[in-house]
Image: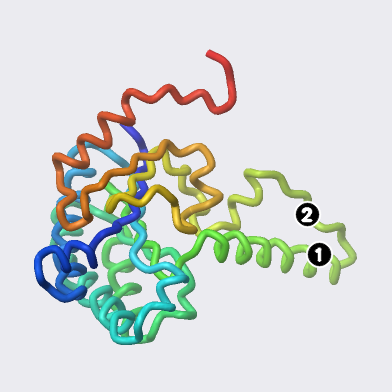
Amino acid sequence: MPRHVAIIMDGNGRWASKHGENRSEGHLAGKESLRECCEYAVEKGIEYLSIFAFSTENWNRPADEVAQLMSLMASSVIGEMGTFRKNSIRFRMLGDRSAVPADVLGPIEEAERETASNTRLDLFVLFCYGGKWDIVNAAGKYGRQCYEAALRGEPCPSIDVDGFSRFLETAGVPDPDLLIRTGGEKRISNFLLWQCAYAEFYFTDILWPDFRKIQFQSALDSFAKRDRRYGQIK
């Protein structure tokens, strides 16, 4: 069983078109899949679940859809507090908080405070997030440490791979073991680029609103058959 599963939830818009609905209805339908997958992750003993909710590239979508996604994020966080309490899910947003409107960031930070002591599943919602942004942001944090050291007349702190990881949004969290992408596309779209260096990938044509426990279990079954060697010979 993977400790950490990451999911790119793709296909809401195509699901809506397929059912004769507008794109916003597809996003709403996707909420049901996320709730079911969170509860199933708890049931299966998965410790960390990371989901891609809004990327840095999504800002390029039509303004009305961006506004809908922002509103959906705020309402979903508020609406799912019962799910978080019932399943002891700890909620946390990863991403550029400076880009999040105040009326959306407020409910996000309230949910983080309210669920901080929950222990069965860490749910990371990557919002206003991009893998390249994460790496550049981490490099900036390290650069500031070097600058502050120079002001004190000290050498720049040494760093290695593990040391650099502590500057990333996922600091202190094990890297994903399994990356799932729904919707038929076979790319990771700037999602957890550093962290997924050794993740197992699972791509499915199932559109996200149709991805439920059965499909989740299929991904877990596929993972169980993988031989993870990390560059070594077994």
The mark found on residue 36 in the picture is none
Q: Which residue is mark 1?
A: 149
Q: Position of residue 216 (x, y in %)?
A: 21, 41
The percent coordinates of residue 166 (x first, y second) are 59, 53
Residue at (21%, 68%) from the top-left corner?
27
Is 57 positioned to the left or the right of 162 in the image? left
Q: Position of residue 203 (x, y in %)?
A: 33, 43
Question: For the point 22% across and 63% down, which residue is it?
Answer: 14
Image height of 36 relative to 108, above or below: above
Q: How far across and how far down the image is residue 107, in percent?
A: 28, 77
Amino acid, disc 2: Pro
Q: Residue at x 46, y 80 (%)?
A: 99
Quadrant of the rendering where the N terminus is positioned: top left
Q: Nearer the viewer, residue 147 or 210?
A: 210
Question: Dot 1: what SS?
Answer: helix
In the picture, measured across the screen, residue 190 lies left or right of residue 209, that is right
Which quarter of the figure has residue 80?
Answer: bottom left
Mark 2 residue element:
loop
> Most extreme residue toward the right, as rendered?
153
Q: Type of residue at label 1?
A: Ala
- What crowding class fits label 1: few (fewer than 14 Cα within 10 Å), some (14-19), or many (20 or more)? some
Asked if 225 appears above or below 213 in the picture, the reply is: above
Asked if marks 2 and 1 touch (Cβ < 8 Å), the reply is yes
Lower sequence index among marks 2 and 1: 1
Q: Residues within 10 Å of mark 2 (few under 14, many from 20)?
A: few
Q: Residue at x 65, y 48 (%)?
A: 163
What residue does disc 2 label? 157
The answer to which image quadrant residue 31 occupies is: bottom left
Cα gap from disc 2 to disc 1, whole angstroms: 8 Å
